[in-house]
Amino acid sequence: MTSAPSSPIPDAGEDAPPIDDSIEPGKRLIRLPADKGLSLGDRVSNYITRLTWRTPLHAFRLKGRFPLKLLGVPADPVPGDKRAGTAIRAGHFLHRGLRLSLGDLDFANLDVAPAFADYLHSFTWLRDLAATGSRADGAPIAEAVVRHWLAVHGEAVGEPAWAAENTGWRILFWSAHAPLILSSSDLIYRSAVLNHLARAARHLDRVADKTRPGTGQLVAWIGIVAASLLMPGGEPRQVFGEAGLRKVIETSFYADGGNIARAPQAQLDAIMALSMLARIYDMRRMEVPPFVQEVLARTVPALLGLVHSDGGMGSWQGSGATSAEHIRAVVAASGVRTRPLKQARDWGYQRVVANKVVLLADAAPPPIARVTEAGCASTLAFELSDGDERIVVNCGGAALTGATIPADLALGLRTTAAHSTLTIGDTNSTAILPGGTLGRGVTEVELDRRETPQGSRLEMSHDGYARRHGLIHRRLLILSPNGRELRGEDMLLPAPRARRKGDKKFTLRFHLGRNLSASLTADKLGALLRIAGGPLWQFRTSEGALAIEESLWVDGNGRPYPTEQLVVTGTTPAGGVSIGWIFKHIG
């Protein structure tokens, strides 16, 4: 495998942990996973563990013995956003296209988008502020916001300020950036900050195992362990927290390292939080627990398996195309040196590489509704990149709501039509219900991946249209050894034991990268795809009517860009249909 010269993916060194990225020939059935969460036995075990370290005798032994202080300041291993930090110093917060003046900041009546509110309540912005200027300049700003937050939310527990994930992040960021918020000589204020850290830890003790499974719950348990290491007398909480963290890791990730929400952004957040926790162990000169090191060794190659040749992220399950710079920073923070995972068998993503060309495909059902708020009906969609250029993409960004992505657009970005795959009758392969949760649809995906003289061959099928339309969608993708051709075939086949339901209209969509300009050929069965100063590609289809329509693509900051899409339409009889097509590099 060779990468584009500009690719920031780190090379695996001799000391890199081995990963199982071998290709298993033959068919594999991938089913919608059972609901992953703590079992009744695990919840009982957690409850008993809490009781064992919260006995009245133990509380009496601790009372008044340990002063409230930080045992040290851990390093924040991920650099902040200098643009956002400069904006804070200039007097306003910036987040996903939204702007809020510090003078208008009112925690008692915070009228901003939910994601912006989380950014403020979690104090993630401290990292951005620390990335610019001197501590002397930033400390008065940080202290003023912390004072205001404590005055409103220090005593009154409620969401979103005290949501488990925000509370976990707040412990991490207040400790990592303590010089910004604890430089004051005001002893009453300093005591209030330290008291809040202690109270936040006790809050997480109660709510962490009741939090929705996934990255939010993981961050909550990380907050518990972090607090135990940051303040005196934390040994009992450390035992409790590490036991809980170990269990939540087991329920938050598949064996191949992918997270249960199947979302790259959740994967990034999880790696970042675990890396911040590792720095706290380092600060205490304590060994990072082996189970934390092991999960980082699994999650990083899974994350890298979804990056393109330019090092930026693909757009899957609500995530935007996160920049190569941020991915590089998070991977560096983890300390893991590894190769991208080619085949995430459980997480459900396939990665094929030929020279500078990268093909990514979704070969699994969507995540279960309970673990995601932005699950997408994207089964069998793919993305294709050539060096620094994205050729075929998904729209992405359904989870990045903000000024430029309102709620109704975010809902549209979750649909099958927002992904480079096939739809029948303008329906989703997995239903998206009015309340936003995922409904019925894909329950099984059949996968067959092989390496042949003609190239890497992926054959996938799903049953998402079987119940409603009586058809199985099968997709074949073959990437040539030199990466200059991607041949595809989309087949609609009668589902076993399904009734004949008459002719069905199908739509095959290929959303194009933001730098591509498409023009139809004279016979209306092909299109030239031009990239200014870049490669020239051609598309051809064997069936249907080809048109070029408007589309959009969302970057990692939640900003949408106008793009184009190739749309092939036609009708399939009850007996099924086959549509062959090709993307070819021609210059």
Image (tube, rainbow, N blue to C red):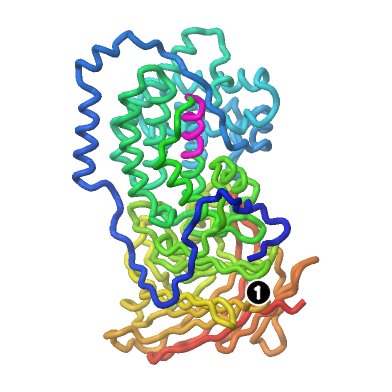
> Is residue 16 toward the left or the right of residue 192 in the image?
right
Is residue 442 in the magenta section? Answer: no
Q: Which residue is mark 1?
A: 483
Residue 186 locus on image (x, y percent): 52, 8
Count of numbered badges drawn on the protein: 1
Where 516 sits versus 249, above or below?
below
Give residue 541's position: percent from left, percent from top.
60, 85
User: Is 278 one of the magenta-colored residues?
Assistant: yes
Secondary structure, mark 1, is: loop
Is 349 or 102 nearer to us in this picture?
A: 349
- Viewer-nearest residue: 166 or 295: 295
User: For mark 1, does the 10 Å Cα neighbourhood hold few (<14), some (14 to 19), or many (20 or more) residues?
Assistant: many
Q: Kindly identify the residue that appears in the image at 33 percent across and 45 percent down.
A: 212
Residue 241 visible, this angle? yes
Q: Quadrant of residue 99?
A: top right
Q: Which SS type dominates the magenta stretch? A: helix
Position of residue 191 measured from the top left corner of the image (x, y, whole percent): 45, 12
Q: Which residues are magenta?
A: 274-284
The residue at the point 52 percent across, 86 percent down is 579
Q: Position of residue 480 (x, y in %)?
A: 62, 78
Q: Which quadrant is the C terminus positioned in?
A: bottom right
Residue type of the residue flagged with mark 1: Gly
Residue 564 visible somewhere in the drawing: no
